[in-house]
Amino acid sequence: MSKATLTAVFIVFLLTSSGAKPNGKNKKPKQAVPAIECDMRAGKIILPEFIVKCPANCRETKEKVYGTGVFASISSICNAAIHSGVITNSGGKVIVMKMAGQTIYKGSFANGVRSLSLPNWRESFSVSVGKPKNGVTYPSTLVFVSSRHTTVKTGDPKDLTYSTASPVTEALEAEPSSTAAPPTTTHVTTPITTSAKPRVTTVHKVREAGVHRQETSTTIRRQLHASSASAALSRVQPQSERKQHTAQSNPAFARRDWPHPAYARPDWFSGTRRPTDSSPSVPNTDYKRSRMSTGDPTALDPRPDNTEYEHWLYNFGQYSPAPEEHKPPSKTSPTRGFNARGHDLTARAPELTSQGDPNCKVDIAFLMDGSWSIGKRRFKIEKDFLVEVSQVINVGVAGPMMGIIQYGDDPVTEFSLKQFSSSKDLKPAISKIVQKGGLSNVGKALSYINEHFFSDANGNRGGAPNVAVVLVDGWPTDKVEEASRLARESGINIFFVTIEGPDENEKQNVVETNFVDKAVCRTNGFFSLPIMSWFALRKEVQSLVKRVCDTDRLVCSKTCLNANDIAFVIDGSSSVGTGNFRTVLQFVANVTQEFEISDTDTRVGIVQYTYEQRLEFAFGQHNNKADLLNAIKRINYWSGGTSTGAAITFAADQLFSKSKPNKRKIMIVITDGRSYDDVRAPALAVHGKGVIAYSIGIAWAAQDELEYIATDPDRDHSFFVDEFDNLYKYVSKIIHNICNEFNSQPRN
């Protein structure tokens, strides 16, 4: 065979062997995994499910994590993954799954990471090992929430650019909706494919808010365009097998369970924005509300200039554009109030308000010692004590409600909170309690009330603080520290009444030293009541009742969202201008709507200033969120000079001098220029009164003055933006810092 013939045969062989593999299957492409930094929070990424790669040594950065297992979206992804054991401190790949917000996130310590507790965040996520299932491909690029509309590139995280998007999710069900509007814009990075059978369960869809800028020689006008991202951001389903279903169509959908949009640029004032507009005229308030007349929540709203925040507020909040349209909630409507547990009380029947002391509206669980060590005689004294407490406290649905758990080896509910609605009915019920016997397992009893007793089914009202009063003969026979910590973090105020505690010779028999200080809400003596003798117990009835009814001091039921008096001090000077002033009011509304608003929860007051000062409204003047948001919108622009120092002094005199005891006093100063007077002395004065001061400077604000005003450290309390339209960026940062400081408070 010739050399040419051999060469031809060899070429044919190569061509036939380089074709498709058997069964026509090509090699699976390798999953591209974007890298992130340790400080990346899940809430910054708008994808509902994605994979990322964490760097090494994130644990040393101490980036904050909130929750256990399920984390608030303001948590660091990488530190949450370390906390969950998904990766080690050397880094690795993590799959992140977004989910609805939780009513409470419990902190814990795991794998060298301490997570914090946090109530009521709007979005959650979980983490799992970064190994995609067969046939599943995650996006190779990430879509972020920010102010510029650009595409995210893979590679070095420092080189990432961001796209504007709003983390609102919409439910998609099995069939397409005939009324759903088609998306105007799609933002698809990498198609996500799966060989699994298409799912017809909930899929998340992300709406974007793109920004289009049009400039002329005299004005700069920005318009916000709402656009829809493709459902390809989640695992793909055929369009024929799903339908769009928005939250508006479900009237029972809880407002705080819906993750609202990123805080968009406001459009309350629809006119041209000028940095130096000094017009003192009142802004246009001629709002159109197309949905009110028909009551159809799915009707399209024709208003072109409304922001995402206003759409959310109109659709899901108790909000009306004019005061005459506002209808205040019923007096019997349940409020979230003190409790961080967030029970859904929408189905509860209206309460009778004919009895009970309204100045002592608390839900109380008495943990009575039924162990054998107490003996029959002292058990009878204990019951007589509880009878007398029930009569003095004036039980009733308008005031305190009372339940009793007897504990020994195991706890048992003698009667729940809802079983008796008057002191008269409680007296014979307590007298009939039979001693259970066993050991004094207080820790087990505290776990029981935390997990089972304070529930809707047992009569927990949600708008009343939860109180647990533990009566102990001598000392517990098990450990109480961990069970107490979990109960406190759930908002339960723990009191200890110790009768005939251990003497010096008996302390060696105590299972857990200093068990009272480890259990109670604060170690300042208010939550502990030591009694020298059983025969002196009934003399302490009045003292105990006074303490459990002092709702201002029930600190365990206080959270970062319901325990504040917040004063906004707003610059109304000529340099701000009418349009920019409406932007500031939108920012104030965005911050305010995150808090629980009532006379017993967070209260808000506002001062506007120029050369002079004007109290727009005081603490407690608007005691529900709808009223408060309407009042903010109705504030009129003043125009004049800039005397920030005098305004701080005015806020201290007119607002903080009337602040409630044990409220956290917070002041947020917003200004766009240097003050004509000195701010140092007024700032030091309010700092000395315990006020936590935040300063927000815009455009021409003086950096040194912002630092004088702000509480130390400046990096957590002082912010600067180059223009008014960027104020919204700091809403989540301020809320995060307020909650972080609250969670870091000592227990003494």
Image (cartoon, rainbow, N blue to C red):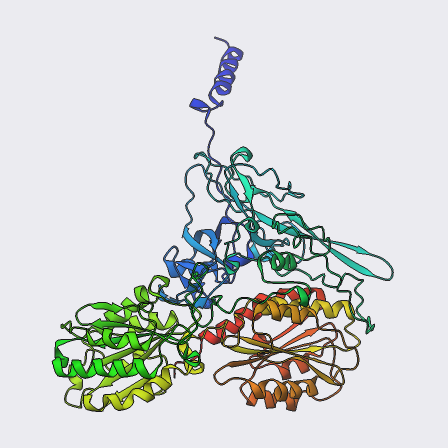
Position of 159 relative to 244 (above/below): below
Which residue corresponds to the image point at 36% horizontal and 80% vertical from the top-left? 394
| Side of 405 where 247 appears, left or right | right
Picture quadrant where residue 288 is located: bottom right
Which residue corresponds to the image point at 79% horizontal and 59% vertical from the top-left? 221
Residue 586 in picture, x, y percent from top left: 67, 66
| Side of 525 where 233 appears, left or right | right
Residue 193 in picture, x, y percent from top left: 50, 37
| Side of 288 where 160 appears, left or right | left
Tell me how many marks there are.
0
Residue ranking furthest to the right: 217
Residue 650 in picture, x, y percent from top left: 66, 87
Which residue is nearer to you in this view: 223 or 460? 460
Which residue is nearer to you in this view: 742 or 34? 742
Position of 515 relative to 100 (above/below): below
Picture quadrant where residue 107 is located: bottom left
Residue 423 in view here: yes
Which residue corresponds to the image point at 27% horizontal and 78% vertical from the top-left? 470
Residue 56 in view here: no
| Side of 135 where 721 appears, left or right | right
Which residue is nearer to you in this view: 123 or 152? 123
Residue 651 in picture, x, y percent from top left: 64, 85
Position of 75 relative to 395 (above/below): above
Which residue is nearer to you in this view: 218 or 614? 614
Q: In which quarter of the image is the C terminus?
A: bottom left
